[in-house]
Image (tube, rainbow, N blue to C red):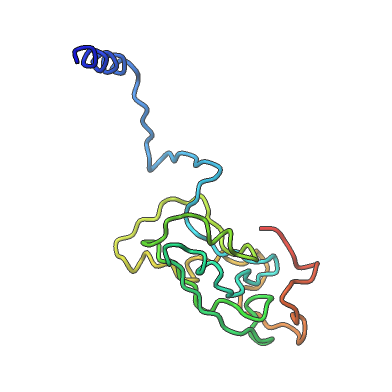
Amino acid sequence: MITEILKGMFITFREIFKPPVTIQYPEVKRPVRQRFRGRHELRRYADGLERCIGCALCAAACPADAIYVEASENTDEQRYSPGERYAKTYEINMLRCIFCGYCEDACPTDAIVLTDAYELSAFSRKDLIYTKDMLIVPPPAGKPGTPQKVEEGAYNRSILPEGLVSEP
């Protein structure tokens, strides 16, 4: 028993002389690890259309039931995504989210991604329910947002033509 006390005192004595490691947080932010999962983000294609097609596979894959997706039909007058449907309502309850990344893995169009943003505080519970407007990235510079008006029959398939496919 005395040897354990001496070992503990030795470790304490050894650590006293090491300089403290302090990061001045608000001014200096630590870089996150490569595989860090932070705030969710809904991506767009290069032409400004939303990647989310409202399939709700992310909601089905979520073990915490934190995602709610309501789909609606696209028209040529109001085109939100290249598919037949789009996510009319997309909400993530960040109070329930466990940041597992299953939603990102389940998405067939790579619409939802987990970024490296980690400052997610709010003053009320309702501010932590992220809506589609809070999650979607702005359209690329010079490109229209959504909805868009397109010529009839331009998007008659659920897969984009080769010229419109782009990486985020």
Left of 104 or right of it: where is 7? left
Q: Position of residue 147 (x, y in %)?
A: 61, 79
Using the image, determine if residue 39 lies above or below residue 151: above
User: Image point 51% across, 49% down: which residue?
Assistant: 116
Count of numbered circles on the image: 0
Q: At 36% across and 61% down in the image, what residue appears?
A: 95
- Percent from the top left, x then y, of residue 132? 50, 71
In the rendering, at what x and y percent does residue 71 appear?
55, 80
Residue at 63% across, 69% down: 51
101 lies above or below 91? above
At horizontal 69% and vertical 86% (from top left) the residue drawn is 76
Vertical placement of residue 78 versus 124, above or below: below
User: Quick one: which residue is furthest to the left in this view?
Assistant: 2
Q: Residue furthest front?
A: 1
Compared with 12, 27 (above or below) is below
Quarter of the view holding residue 145: bottom right
Q: Nearer the viewer, residue 109 or 78?
A: 109
Q: Nearer the viewer, residue 110 or 43?
A: 110
Image quarter in which the N terminus is found = top left
Residue placed furthest toward the right: 162
Residue 112, quarter of picture: bottom right
Residue 59 rendering spot, x and y as whole percentages: 50, 69
Q: Is residue 168 left or right of residue 123?
A: right
Instruction: Identify the image quadrant of residue 137.
Output: bottom right
The image quadrant where one finds the C terminus is bottom right
Nearest the viewer among 23 and 41 is: 41
